[in-house]
Image (tube, helix red, strand yellow):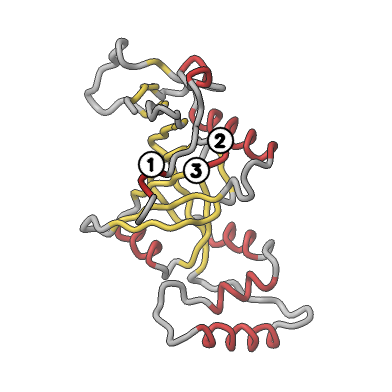
């Protein structure tokens, strides 16, 4: 633990404040796309589509892990996994989840809250067969989140399946593997500041019975409202 409390690095300066007037769009998906494209084009992060997925059991016990976002559009954010994994079981119990993208070189993050749903088996198969063959085999080898005695179990089965599906042999997509689409109902855009007065802009929809407060809210596009949050 020695010295951890003293680890500090400069973030942005006051001249780089991120405010509502600096939004690339008043639609959260388009704002996300603007930040994502900037990161991708500048090659500032090796995997800009890496995101944390936080889930919780029906009783509220949380868990979190990193996955790769494979697509995002007006419908939501898509990732693929083993449906029998811990996150799969938790999303079956409680489809509400959170996503987070963190792009350290530019000290920006985006948090997204939404509801996950399984995509069609056809679309899952389409992506599965676009993957490298070893990745397809890996989806069969790994019974994700299950307890195994050692690494050798995985390596042995991998070699057996590589031999079985060598050449032009097609790898069957497991029924327990596929995609989740997370449909957002809230976005938060965060930009770090050295003085720790970070910039936080939230997009959300008005709750039932809630009235628009022009002192605290601004109108976004497509029914979204925009709020600035204290750091």
Q: Nearer the viewer, mark 2 or mark 3?
A: 2
Residues at marks 2 and 3, CA–CA distance in whole angstroms: 9 Å
Q: Which mark is residue 106?
A: 2
Q: As drawn, is 144 to the left or to the right of 171?
A: left
Can you see residue 202? no
Mark 2 or mark 1, which is nearer to you? 2
Q: CA distance from mark 2 to mark 1?
A: 22 Å
Residue in view at x 62 percent, y 76 percent:
137
Please state the total of marks drawn on the protein image.
3
Picture quarter containing residue 174? bottom right
Q: Quadrant of residue 36?
A: top right
Q: Which residue is mark 3?
A: 102
Q: Nearer the viewer, mark 3 or mark 1?
A: 3
Q: Residue at x 68, y 87 (%)?
A: 164
**Above or below, comparing residue 162 to residue 80 in the picture:** below
Q: Can the viewer see residue 43? A: yes
- The percent coordinates of residue 15 (x first, y second) are 52, 17
Residue 90, image x, y percentages: 33, 61
Residue 208: give x, y in percent of width and height.
Answer: 25, 28
Would you name the residue on which mark 1 appears? 113
CA neighbours of label 2 inside 10 A, class few (<14), some (14 to 19), many (20+): some
Name the residue at 55% across, 54% down: 68
Query: In terms of secondary structure, where does tag 1 sit?
Result: strand
Residue 95, numbered circle: none
- Residue 154: x, y in percent? 54, 83
For label 3, the crowd category at 10 Å Cα-Cα, with few meaning under 14, some 14 to 19 and many 20 or more, is: some
- Residue displayed at 58% across by 60% down: 122
Q: Mark 3: which secondary structure?
A: strand
Q: Earlier in the sequence, mark 3 or mark 1?
A: 3
Query: Up-down: is 164 above or below 18?
Result: below
Q: Is residue 30 left or right of residue 129?
A: left
């Amino acid at each position: 633990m020695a010295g951890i409390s003293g680890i500090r690095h400069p973030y942005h300066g006051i001249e780089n404040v991120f405010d509502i007037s600096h939004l690339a769009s008043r639609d959260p998906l388009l704002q996300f796309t603007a930040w994502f494209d900037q990161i991708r084009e500048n090659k500032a992060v090796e995997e800009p589509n890496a995101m944390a997925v936080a889930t919780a059991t029906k009783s509220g016990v949380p868990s979190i892990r990193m996955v790769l976002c494979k697509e995002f559009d007006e419908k939501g954010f898509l990732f693929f996994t083993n449906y029998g994994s811990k996150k799969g079981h938790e999303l079956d119990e409680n489809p509400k989840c959170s996503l987070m993208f963190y792009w350290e070189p530019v000290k920006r993050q985006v948090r997204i809250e939404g509801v996950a749903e399984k995509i069609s088996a056809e679309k899952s198969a389409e992506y599965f067969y676009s993957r490298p063959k070893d990745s397809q085999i890996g989806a069969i080898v790994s019974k994700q989140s299950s307890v195994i005695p050692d690494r050798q179990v995985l390596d042995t089965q991998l070699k057996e399946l590589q031999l079985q599906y060598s050449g032009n042999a097609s790898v069957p997509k497991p029924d327990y593997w596929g995609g989740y689409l997370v449909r957002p109902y809230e976005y938060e855009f965060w930009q770090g500041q050295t003085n720790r007065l970070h910039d936080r802009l939230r997009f959300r929809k008005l709750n039932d019975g809630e009235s628009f407060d022009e002192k605290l809210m601004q109108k976004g596009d497509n029914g979204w409202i925009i709020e600035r949050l204290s750091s």
